[in-house]
Image (cartoon, grey):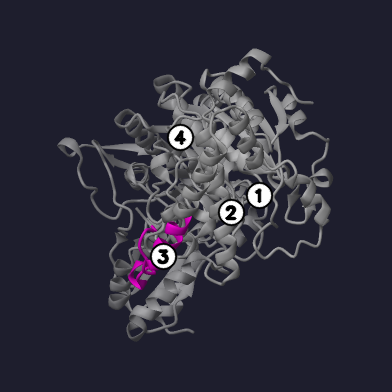
Amino acid sequence: MSTVQDLSTPHAGPLPGGEGGRTREITYAEALNEALREEMRRDPAVFVMGEDVAVWGGGGIFGVTRGLVEEFGAERVRDTPISEEAIAAVAVGAAATGSRPVAEIMYVDFIGLAMEPIVNQAAKLRYMFGGKARVPLVIRAQEGAGRGNAAQHSQSLEAWFCHIPGLKVVTPSTPADAKGLLKSAIRDDNPVIFLEHKALYFTKGGVPDGDLTIPLGVADVKRVGSDVTVVGVHTMVGKALQAARQLATEGIELEVIDPRSLVPLDEQAIVESVKKTGRLIVSHEAYTRGGYGSEIISRVVEAAFDYLDAPPVRVCARDVPVPYSAPLETAALPQVEDLVTAARALVHNER
Amino acid sequence: MSVDLRTPATIASTAAQLDLREALRLMLTIRLFDEQAVALFRAGEIRGSTHPYIGMEAVGVGVTLALRPTDYVTSTHRGHGHTIAKGGDVRRMMAELLGRSTGYSGGKGGSMHIADMDRHMLGANGIVGGGMGLATGAALTARLQHTGSVAVCFFGDGALEQGVLHETTNLAAIWKLPVVYVCENNQYAMSTRSDWSVAGGDPASRAAGYGIPGLTVDGMDLVAVHSAACDFVERARRGDGPAYLICTTYRYHGHHAADPLNYREREEVERWRQVDPIERVKRAVVDGGVMTAAEVAELERGVEAEIEAAVEFGKASPEPDPDQLMTDIYA
């Protein structure tokens, strides 16, 4: 059974040093909080809105917006009613007129109520108006399972947004990535769907001091290996690193790649890795059917078919609503052992 | 129940300040533009669909003349009138309808997606209720950046039944945002009669539920629309929050240029044409000594020539190059 400890993401290598090369150990939630705080200080057009972002527990159900209302006031840190469509729709209108909203949808599962403004307004205004509009909007939401939140509070829905031209989609797995990517997302002139993972909020990692920005569209090789490429999203990065440590004792070396943003996707990094290893596993907590892993596999097959020694494999969630009970939830989600088994089978040609 | 906050004196004052000649010019431009659009659609020169604003000119013009250039407007699928009223260029509009590279969107949007961001016209919109968030968000920018701008959201009676109207009205009311929601009740959402689809009778009565003013006016009467709009726009600008302005009006044509029109009687259309908003303004300017009948005729000929020139400009413009297909997706 997964615990928060299991889900932590160790670092493959040293992080780029910040000012003076100093790095602090902070949580993923604290890193996101720093990103928001720094960007709000830097640019008065940035503001935050969403359900329970200001008052509840000092700011946000996971503390991501903690303390912001004290520093920036209630005008720029706006608690909203439970109106997801209005949150997204009003944020689009604010973004199109010169603001830089960071709107929060508390659980990505609730975003079905807000799909119209995201899909038909935010993503399309620029194109429909022949390039005359800019929509510098960030929609933050958290997704993922592992906490017993059951079917309407545990989904991973990133594929919905990857399907829509005009949106960018970001999925950080470490505190440093969370901070650097959120700062870049806020500075981006396009609508960015910024998806956090609820089980990662309290995991710790090194975050360099200073103005840390990480460009969207650049993957991070979290572990170098020669035998199997594992492309993981969110918690599956950490699980892949655990599987790699286990398999290393058997002489199987995994290369673990975190794309960090799914749109734009660093296809080259993934393809280059597969050309080296000849084997590919994609892994996410999103449902297998129609998941973004299938898109990654398609791209690799199109770009590097001749390099593949075995059919690519999806180690993703089962196609079932996320169940409540611990053993059922664990069975629905891809686990370290599933990655280990899949990698062994690929290497030993057991398919 | 409508709540009219105006006094006879304020109504007379806004009427006196209204530039009737400019209003008439804009109303004629809208009508002649859309008559051409319908003709071009029937001739097969406009693709997809086009939704004429003919009959509703007093609403778009009456409201927009209550605005400053920096105020925002969001529109609907029936958006030509709002764009023209906000100062849009009919040549670039017609070119867009004809799918040409010189159009507002370079041919990427068509009739339902014309915006003039420089004039704070935030676009026609193909989604019923799609403008509500945009207008309310524009009002939030105005509030956060202290610009003094107001946003006007035009929407049809069909959008009275969309959930987003409730969410955005509620949010604008509790935040006291400077936005005015203007319903163009043209009696039909495609074939669906608004006197059947709208529960509770007069839609203006819903405003009381949000603690905001709501007023229903004769949408075929330019002065009535303008006076009410001035009142609500300035109220919003003062920081007193949103309002509902319901304009009772009628579209002479169908929902779009290919409407079967099997759901209403010809006599009904004739009754509404008896209170035509443009004819009423023509009579008012002549009776009031603002213009002579000859000047009105000259104005109309000038507008006709402008629309003909717009059609010629559009037809003479090139279609977009295929290499433009994948541009403008991301900034």
**Label 3 belongs to which residue?**
B100
Q: Which quadrant of the structure image shows residue A183?
A: top left
The chain letter for the residue carrying disc 4 is A
Q: Earlier in the sequence, mark 1 or mark 4?
A: 4
Q: Nearer the viewer, residue A307 or B43?
A: B43
The CA distance from mark 2 to mark 3 is 44 Å
**Label 1 belongs to which residue?**
A152
Secondary structure under the numbered disc 2 in the rendered image: loop
**Label 4 belongs to which residue?**
A64
Vertical placement of residue A124 versus B232, above or below? below
Residue at horizontal 32 percent and vertical 38 percent from the top: A25
Q: Is residue A141 visible?
A: no
Q: Which mark is on residue A155? A: 2
Q: Are marks 3 and 4 in contact (CB under 8 Å)?
A: no
Q: Position of residue A186 (x, y in %)?
A: 37, 42
Q: Three-letter amino acid code at disc 3?
A: Arg
Badge 3 crowding class, 10 Å Cα cut-off, few under 14, some 14 to 19, many 20 or more, is many
The CA distance from mark 3 to mark 4 is 47 Å
Inspect the magenta stretch and tell me whether residue A67 lies in it.
Answer: no
Secondary structure under the numbered disc 1 in the rendered image: loop
Secondary structure under the numbered disc 3 in the rendered image: loop
Badge 4 crowding class, 10 Å Cα cut-off, few under 14, some 14 to 19, many 20 or more, is many
Q: Nearer the viewer, mark 1 or mark 3?
A: 3
